[in-house]
Image (spheres, coloured by chain):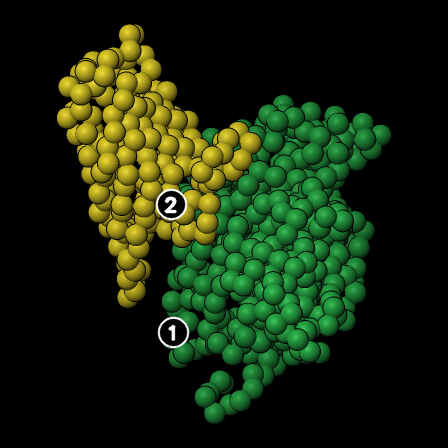
Chain colours: A green, B yellow
């Protein structure tokens, strides 16, 4: 175990698999400062991290401020139209140069000594440069630092602060299929994060949300009141999932997609509902508009219905992106025991405003600081964190579905480690990948 | 119904202020039935995220019509709404009340609130402050006033806020 005299963290010791006890993790993973610092270095400063969506900065000079790990950055679309991730830090004394959450500006000016940086990162003006004399910094050496690697998939922008490492496509891996199907739900094939965002903070470790999204097991209990409320208001949308006691029979599955990515796959469940077209708006009538438009695009109604059947799946992209139902969600670690979750309603490009408004309403009924679902999750995370004080037995066993999981072809025809929805296959997948990254393998 | 005059508004001020103070007490004490009874059938309850936003095109913290308010209260009455188990202990001050003639014989009020929330979770306790501005549109129904519309703008509404499980 970790003691003050032990100078390093052994992730083999903290995340264990063994025929005798199955799979277990040590709760120090949620409460050890050194582990948190190593996560920042190894996951958030070295690996690929989701940073924002193209539609948040659609025009030249648009920007939003973000945090990578704990480092403040600016996601900027430069005057040249190119998207960059710039460190929000003046190269003179290190002040943050951008104070607004979002905006449109060609320049970022440090108020302290007047240095001005272009939104492409270049130092555009240094005040009183002659005073440096022979010590004048060489041209190009005092630009805002820029994430050396940036890439995107269907508008989702990812960046890495390491110049070299795993190629982006390889990192995204199988998550790409599920992101594609989500975006294909929009008549124009694109989603838009143009409808604002919620931010909710909780006093718990960031990984609790990472593990939670594909955990169907908690829904019936943590979300009992929300499910009851949705059932009472049930339209075509959220039928079966709201029937308490019914979860065991559900056709939805947990799939470990590898690379720390995971999905709670609702495809089979939705398909079993036949023509009840789901997750494209608040009612079947609205959904018909979407299906019609997609069918026109794809030249196939069958394909359109297939896409709507995938719409409810919960997709976790390691380490900080989650996509489900009407929204895109990101996790922002703040400290060892504090995190923020941002929720952006995902608008469907090419859909009517009526449908997109319905998506906003349906999203905010569940999520955000006063939604029916999210606050109870936050409460559970805070209670989990409170429990980590007791070290008598530090082990958390993640053995659900271990004996029944199997390799199964998913709806893209690709093999995936799969268990019934009340298992812990996806949690094991996330931790296996975490161990791989944190061990520096 | 005819709009009321400024002079009439001044005469109504004590009962309007009393309405807002009573509403504050109902929210502090989690008296959901009494609070619900302060709404008219037209009720729209809005807690925006961004300070100037359109609830139809931008996400809100809460946007509920009268039926939505009822659904929300139905959940809040349950002990299984875990974010409020145990319930927060709240004390709020409502002040800076301005009262103006509204539409159809009603009044519009602007006020400021400060809430201290005390929360207990097992052995842990936590005290938080919430603050913001409210806009009420009230209409007269016989001898009582009811809320047609309430907009609550939290100071940090577009920032990162903890789970909000009690009434604001």
Q: Nearer the viewer, residue B137 or A253?
A: B137
When the figure is inspected, residue A64 is found, relative to residue A318, above or below; the finding is: above
With A48 as the anchor, is B114 left or right in this view?
left
Residue plotted at (53% across, 50% down):
A100
Residue B78, horizontal then vertical, whole percent: 33, 43
Front: mark 2 or 1: 2
Q: Quadrant of residue A417?
A: bottom right
Residue plotted at (30% across, 64% down):
B124
Q: Residues within 10 Å of mark 1 (few under 14, many from 20)?
A: few
| Image quarter (top left, top right, bottom left or bottom right) of the C terminus of chain A | bottom right
Residue A257, horizontal then vertical, whole percent: 71, 59
In the rendered structure, find residue A389 and report the number of the disc placed on it: 1
Q: Which residue is mark 2?
A: B155
When the figure is inspected, residue A62 is found, relative to residue A85, above or below; the finding is: above
When the figure is inspected, residue A70 is found, relative to residue B84, above or below; the finding is: below
Secondary structure under tag 1 reads loop
Q: Nearer the viewer, residue A111 or A276?
A: A111
Residue plotted at (57% across, 34% down):
A359
With A241 as the anchor, is B156 left or right in this view?
left
Secondary structure under tag 2 reads loop
Residue A335 in view of the camera: yes
Circle 1 chain:
A
């Amino acid at each position: 175990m970790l003691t003050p005299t032990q100078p390093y963290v052994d992730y083999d010791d903290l995340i264990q698999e063994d025929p005798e006890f199955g799979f277990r993790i040590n709760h120090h993973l949620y409460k050890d400062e050194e582990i948190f610092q190593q996560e920042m270095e190894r996951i958030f400063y070295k690996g690929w991290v989701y940073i924002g969506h193209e539609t948040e900065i659609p025009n030249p000079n648009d920007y939003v401020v973000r945090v990578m790990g704990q480092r403040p950055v600016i996601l900027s679309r430069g005057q040249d139209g190119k998207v960059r991730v710039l460190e929000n830090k003046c190269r003179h004394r290190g002040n943050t140069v951008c104070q607004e959450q979002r905006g449109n500006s060609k320049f970022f000016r440090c108020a302290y000594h007047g240095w001005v940086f272009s939104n492409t990162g270049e130092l555009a003006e240094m005040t009183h440069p002659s005073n440096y004399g022979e010590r004048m910094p060489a041209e190009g050496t005092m630009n805002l630092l820029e994430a050396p690697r940036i890439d995107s998939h269907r508008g989702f922008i990812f960046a890495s602060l390491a110049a070299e490492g795993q190629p982006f496509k390889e990192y995204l891996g199988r998550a790409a299929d599920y992101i594609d199907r989500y975006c294909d739900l929009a008549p124009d094939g694109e989603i838009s994060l143009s409808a604002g965002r919620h931010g909710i903070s909780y006093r718990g470790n960031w990984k609790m949300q990472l593990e939670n999204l594909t955990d169907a097991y908690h829904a019936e209990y943590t979300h009992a009141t929300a499910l009851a409320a949705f059932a009472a208001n049930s339209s075509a949308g959220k039928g079966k999932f709201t029937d308490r006691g019914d979860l065991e029979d559900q056709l939805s599955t947990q799939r470990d997609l590898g690379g720390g990515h995971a999905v709670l796959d609702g495809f089979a469940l939705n398909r079993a509902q036949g023509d009840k077209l789901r997750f494209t708006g608040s009612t079947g009538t609205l959904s018909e508009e979407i299906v019609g438009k997609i069918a026109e695009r794809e030249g196939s109604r069958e394909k359109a219905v297939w896409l709507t059947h995938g719409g409810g799946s919960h997709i976790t992209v390691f380490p900080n992106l989650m996509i489900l139902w009407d929204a895109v969600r990101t996790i922002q670690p703040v400290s060892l025991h504090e995190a923020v979750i941002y929720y952006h309603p995902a608008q469907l490009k090419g859909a009517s405003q009526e449908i997109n408004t319905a998506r906003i309403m349906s999203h905010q009924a569940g999520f955000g600081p006063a939604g029916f679902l999210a606050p109870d999750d936050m409460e559970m995370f805070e209670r989990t964190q409170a429990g980590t004080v007791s070290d008598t037995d530090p082990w958390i066993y993640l053995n659900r579905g271990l004996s029944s999981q199997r390799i199964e072809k998913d709806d893209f025809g690709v093999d995936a480690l799969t268990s019934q929805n009340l298992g812990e296959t996806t949690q094991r997948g996330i931790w296996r990948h975490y161990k791989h990254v944190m061990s520096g393998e | 119904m005819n709009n009321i005059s400024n002079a009439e508004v001044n005469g109504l001020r004590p009962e309007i202020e009393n309405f807002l103070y009573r509403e504050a007490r109902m929210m502090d004490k989690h008296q959901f039935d009494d609070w619900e009874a302060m709404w008219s059938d037209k009720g729209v309850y809005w807690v925006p995220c961004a300070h100037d936003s359109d609830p139809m095109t931008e996400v809100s913290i809460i946007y509920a019509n009268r039926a939505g308010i009822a659904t929300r209260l139905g959940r809040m009455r349950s002990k299984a709404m875990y974010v409020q188990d145990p319930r927060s202990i709240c004390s709020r001050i409502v002040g800076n009340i301005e009262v103006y003639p509204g539409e159809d014989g009603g009044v519009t009020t602007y006020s400021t609130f400060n809430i201290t929330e005390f929360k207990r979770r097992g052995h842990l306790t936590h005290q938080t402050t919430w603050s913001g501005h409210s806009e009420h549109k009230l209409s007269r129904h016989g001898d009582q006033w009811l809320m047609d519309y309430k907009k609550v703008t939290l100071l940090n509404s577009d920032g990162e806020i903890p789970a909000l499980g009690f009434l604001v």
